[in-house]
Amino acid sequence: MSTRDRILDAAADVMRTLGLARATTKEIARVAGFSEATLYKHFRDKEDLFLHVLKERLPALAPVMRRLAESAGAGTVEGNLAELALRAIEFYLQTVPMAASLFSDPRLLAGHREGLARHNAGPHHSAEGLAAYLRAERELGRVAADADVEAVARLLLGGCLQHAFWTYFTDAQEPPETAATRLAHAAARALT
């Protein structure tokens, strides 16, 4: 296993157990078995490392968004939304424990927000991508002309995030597949 991969595995583990706010590059380097200097040879900063953990160690949401953008007119809108919702729930189930601690410290959250902006990243990209897909479906006549696609995109992704939060908070056992199907059905109804 490469040094970079060991660092990413350690970062995912530390961020999952300590949360992003308490995960330090020093602790990540220690768990990986390297110096902090070695970590910085592969990653610019903690935000860069976090983004690579999201992309390379968690259920992939970006490829699903790309496939969704290309699937306008194919399958059913509800089926496409159900696939996206399932992947979003799987993604959020992994990221909620990592990111939740950021919200307890406004200074840390602001710094993280600035770091994401430097890397042109952030949660808004998913909602924008979903809204673009829904606009394409609207142009094809598969979504109502007056549907508020931006609101539906936020509601669907927000529902997926809420399911992940609820799962942790209540130890709920509704399978992600069931929740994704229900959320996609509700979203599809809002688009007709």
Image (cartoon, grey):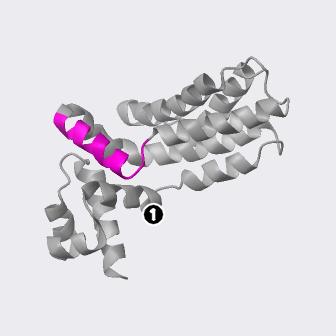
Query: Magenta stretch: dominant SS?
Result: helix
Q: Residue at x 38, y 59 (%)?
A: 53
Specify the quadrant of the image occupied by residue 114: top left
Residue 57 against residue 23 in the figure, above or below: below
Q: Is residue 122 visible?
A: yes
Could you say which quadrant of the image residue 96 lies in? top left
**Point 38% across, 53% down: residue:** 119
Tell me residue 151's x, y (percent).
59, 23
Q: Is residue 118 magenta?
A: yes
Assign a secondary structure to mark 1.
helix
| Residue 108, magenta (yes or no) | yes
Residue at the image position 36 percent from the left and 82 percent from the top: 2
Quadrant assignment for the C terminus: top right
Residue 107, position as x, y percentages in the image: 17, 36
In terms of image quadrants, where is residue 80? top right
Three-letter code, disc 1: Glu
Give the extent of the magenta segment. 107-122
Horizontally, is 139 left or right of 107 in the view?
A: right
Horizontal and vertical percent for residue 168?
38, 36
Residue 32 visible, this angle: no
Q: Quadrant of the N terminus?
A: bottom left
Tell me where residue 18 appears, x and y as whole percent: 22, 50
Q: Residue furthest top?
A: 146
- Taking the spot 21% from the left edge, 76% from the top edge, the residue there is 38
Task: Using a 10 Å C-alpha cutoff, classify the residue at mark 1 as few (fewer than 14 neighbours), some (14 to 19) or many (20 or more).
Answer: some
Q: Nearer the viewer, residue 135 or 23?
A: 135
The residue under label 1 is: 56
